[in-house]
Amino acid sequence: MIHEILPVGILQCNCSILGDEQSKEALVVDPGDNIPQILGILSRHGLRVTAIVITHAHIDHIGGAEKLKQATGAPVYMNAADLPLRDRLDVQAAWLGVEQPEAAQIDVQLRDGDRLRVGGTELDVLHTPGHTQGSVCLLVPAEGKLIAGDTLFRESIGRTDLPGGDYGQILKSIHHKLLVLPDETLVIPGHGPNTTIGHERQANLFLR
Ligand SMILES: [Zn+2]
């Protein structure tokens, strides 16, 4: 499977492009910004976007979703608990001092246990509230990979001091949904370097 990760926008959100070599289907996770670059990668691989998946509705993750939707016609997937955040992109833009992007309509609501597909590869949706109420992670069992959004970072966890954040809840989500995965699971966080579940189990001080 093709997997390109590019940091987008001023907060350098890790956008993932997952593509199937055979069917040329692609799924784009968290197109926060830099839509021309994302479209460039898609066309370089000859990929056609079948789904735009938002791990949570912070502006650095959802900011470019509407533009990408208009460019590709692909539906946008997100958990409904983050709709209130999606509706306040004006406030979020003001926090960052960036221009307010057009908000994407959510076409498909993601729920815990949902299964997405890109070509022959399955992705499992894990609802992991705490950073925001609608935060989700995407597990790709066949690849041993987890796209973690802002729930888990290398030796850190998502902040919980913004509206919708809950410290007890994010710890519970990580312990019950993520640390149960095999040690060798590769974690691609929403920002910063990759890690593994095993490394976080051992070295993440927030999870002691
Ligand atoms: Zn966030």
Image (cartoon, rainbow, N blue to C red):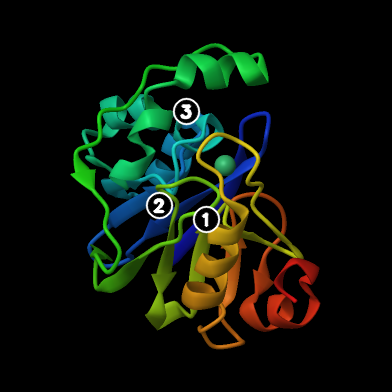
Residue 3 vertical position relative to residue 48 in the rendered view, above or below = below
Q: Which residue is mark 2?
A: 45
Q: Amino acid at mark 3?
A: Gly
Element class at badge 1: strand
| Residue 110 place in picture, x, y as percent | 27, 53
| Residue 111 place in picture, x, y as percent | 26, 58
Q: Quadrant where the N terminus lies?
A: bottom left
Q: Which residue is mark 3?
A: 63
Relative to 102, is 114 on the left or the right?
left
Relative to 108, is 46 on the left or the right?
right
The residue lying toward the viewer, choosing from 179 and 119, is 179
Q: Visible in this render: residue 78?
A: no
Q: Which residue is mark 1?
A: 4
Specify whether tag 1 is near ligand 1 (CB below 8 Å): no
- From mark 3 to mark 2, how far is it between C-alphas? 24 Å
Q: Label 3: how many residues lie within 10 Å, few (<14), some (14-19) or many (20+)? A: many
* Residue 62 placement: quadrant: top left
